[in-house]
Image: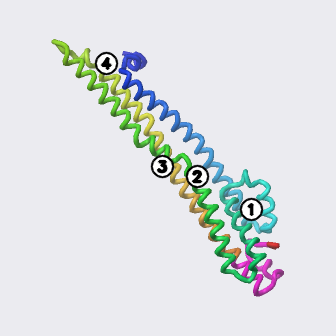
Amino acid sequence: MSLLSLVARASVTVQLVMLVLLAASVLSWVIIYLKYDVLKNAREDAMRFEDQFWSGINLSDLYARIKKNTEHGSGMARIFIAGFAEYVRVHKHASNNTEMMLSGVQRSMKVALAREEEKLDAHLSMLATIGSISPYIGLFGTVWGIMRSFIALGSVQQASLAMVAPGIAEALIATAMGLFAAIPAVIAYNRYAERVDKLAISYENFAEEFATILQRQSQCLQTEGEGRCDESASGSGDQS
């Protein structure tokens, strides 16, 4: 009773269950690999952008530099672009209304933040689904295989363990395949969900800090003049 022979001799229903579980396992490993790469790059890009942002670079220069490479920028960079573009737009039309400026910037960054979080969460639900339903699909295959074995057993005069062992063995393979598909998916989902939460928190913190900088910059421009404001506003530069 080799593994391949048991699979080959299994009923069509059990074989379909095994095929579904095999496809689920392959899909989960593809998602695990791709998601690992996405989250790793997002974390590295966020750290790289924060180093640039807090280095004291002129924000207008940073905006122009990142704007050219928006497609390759990190989620944090896209939040910065959305907030700074809205700040420049509102500042030109309502330079004396700090509250309007801050409200517009926060709305723009909130939308950008939601989009970036959606990208980070992409396909995680699929891992959760595979991890949740695979054991039950495997259990269905097992129950079906055992039921088929006992039905066949009832039609003979003299029963023996050798008669039911192959059917039970092929049925238990479905359970094993269900666990094989579910366990990596559950582990990956938990780890990736934690990483997504940490990235989302870092994005939110940056958005709040950036909004505070722009608010201070706007107030400083109103009360002290642009030249002195550039010297006193930390992390900001000439916005014109």
**Mark 3 vs mark 1: which is more N-terminal?**
1
- At 35% from the left edge and 21% from the top edge, which residue is drawn? 11
Residue that label 2 marks: 120
Q: Secondary structure at mark 1?
A: helix
Residue 151, image x and y in percent? 23, 21
* Magenta span: 215-237
Image quarter of the N terminus:
top left
Q: Secondary structure at mark 3?
A: helix
Q: Nearer the viewer, mark 3 or mark 2?
A: 2
- At 40% from the left edge and 34% from the top edge, which residue is drawn? 178
Q: Residues within 10 Å of mark 1 (few under 14, many from 20)?
A: some
Q: Residues within 10 Å of mark 3 (few under 14, many from 20)?
A: some
Residue 214, image x and y in percent? 71, 74
Give the residue type at disc 2: Leu
Q: Name the mark on residue 166.
A: 4
Q: Nearer the viewer, mark 2 or mark 1?
A: 2
Q: Secondary structure at mark 2?
A: helix
**Mark 3 vs mark 4: which is more N-terminal?**
4
Whether residue 236 appears in magenta in the rendering, the answer is: yes
Residue that label 3 marks: 190
**Cα distance in 3D space between marks 3 and 4:** 37 Å
Most extreme residue toward the left, as rendered?
157
**Cα distance in 3D space between marks 3 and 2:** 14 Å
Give the residue type at disc 4: Pro
Q: Secondary structure at mark 4?
A: helix
Give the residue type at disc 1: Gln
